[in-house]
Amino acid sequence: MTVALVGIGNLGSALIRSLLASSYSMESVSLESVLLIERDNDKRAELSRQHGCRVEGHFPDGMVLGAGDVLILTVKPQDAETACIQVKSAISQQAVVISCMAGVSCASLSRLLDNEKIVRAMPNLGAAFRESASAVFIPDTLTAEEFRHVSAIINACGKVWHVAHEDLIDVATAVAGSGPAYMCWLAEQLEMVAIESGIPAGDAHALVLQTFKGAVSYLEGTAETFSELRRRVTSPNGTTAAALSVLEERAAAGHIRDAVRAALSRARELNS
């Protein structure tokens, strides 16, 4: 069994890190059976040192992935066609392809690779620490064993939600795939006010980071909804109420939802 990964950027590195650290790797995949494809000569040696697996600039001559093998594509969406052309000769119709590219449909990949075993998954950078919120669409072209195999790979990255329709991957892309950027944008604003108000930069960063961590831990420990925790923290006429009143006056909620909808619209545009 071979697992080959093409596109070793931020997400690709996060995926391979989780995969090799998981029980899935110990049970099903050895370091020798993992292949990373990286065209940049300077990056290959570092990737090999980091992960301990084989790193090549292209698929070795004569190598063809077949039944039981998996190709994971994490290249940028705009590079999808070029990447598929480069790897097509190394992919048989029996291999399974997992695409982690936003806005590239199963139909497009099937046409480019002449393969109907196309899975779409949308993990996020939490995968680097096995904390990804991942959505996955697995078509009925896969066998039960292939379904189990793919699920194990995605499960290795964190928590997984199976979606019944491929178009819901676009929703997951806008919400969870891009979600860390939205959260960091908000964190930047909190951090900036703390620094402007006299807290040292290092302390401001740590304070905001721990605030996010504490809120997540509380929500996981109590099973309260986001709205319930917000109301619990918001005392009448208190500091939190003062902040939220500004957001309400400026219709911030609508702007945030519009921003996420813009991400969803862009994902759908990429599919067309």
Image (cartoon, rainbow, N blue to C red):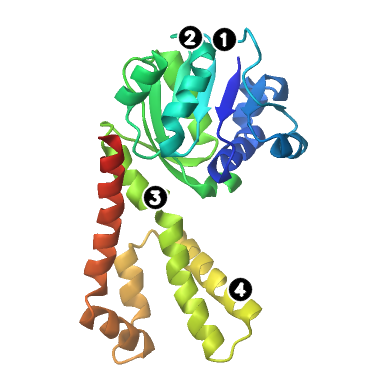
For marks 1 and 2, the one nearer the N-term is: 1
* Residue 175 percent location from the top left of the image: 34, 52
Residue wearing tag 3: 176
Q: Is residue 255 visible?
A: yes
Badge 3 vs badge 1, beta-carbon distance below 8 Å = no
> Amino acid type of disc 4?
Ala
Q: Label 4, label 3: how many angstroms apart (C-alpha)?
A: 23 Å
Q: Label 1, label 2: how many angstroms apart (C-alpha)?
A: 6 Å
Q: Label 2, label 4: how many angstroms apart (C-alpha)?
A: 49 Å
Front residue of this view, candidates 1 and 193: 193
In the rendered structure, the answer to whether residue 89 lies left or right of residue 111 reads right
For marks 2 and 3, the one nearer the N-term is: 2
Please identify the quadrant where the C terminus is shown: top left
Q: Label 1, label 4: how many angstroms apart (C-alpha)?
A: 48 Å
SS of the residue at dot 3?
Answer: helix
Mark whose residue sits in front, 2 or 3? 2
Give above or below for 125 relative to 217.
Answer: above
For marks 4 and 3, the one nearer the N-term is: 3
For marks 2 and 4, the one nearer the N-term is: 2
Mark whose residue sits in front, 1 or 4? 1
Give above or below for 67 relative to 213.
Answer: above
> Amino acid type of disc 2?
Ser
Q: Residue at x 61, y 10 (%)?
A: 63
Residue wearing tag 4: 206
Q: Label 3, label 1: how many angstroms apart (C-alpha)?
A: 34 Å
Please identify the quadrant where the N terminus is shown: top right
Badge 2 vs badge 4, beta-carbon distance below 8 Å = no
For marks 3 and 1, the one nearer the N-term is: 1
Are there few (<14), some (14-19), or many (20+) residues within 10 Å of tag 3? Answer: many
Residue 92 is labelled as 2
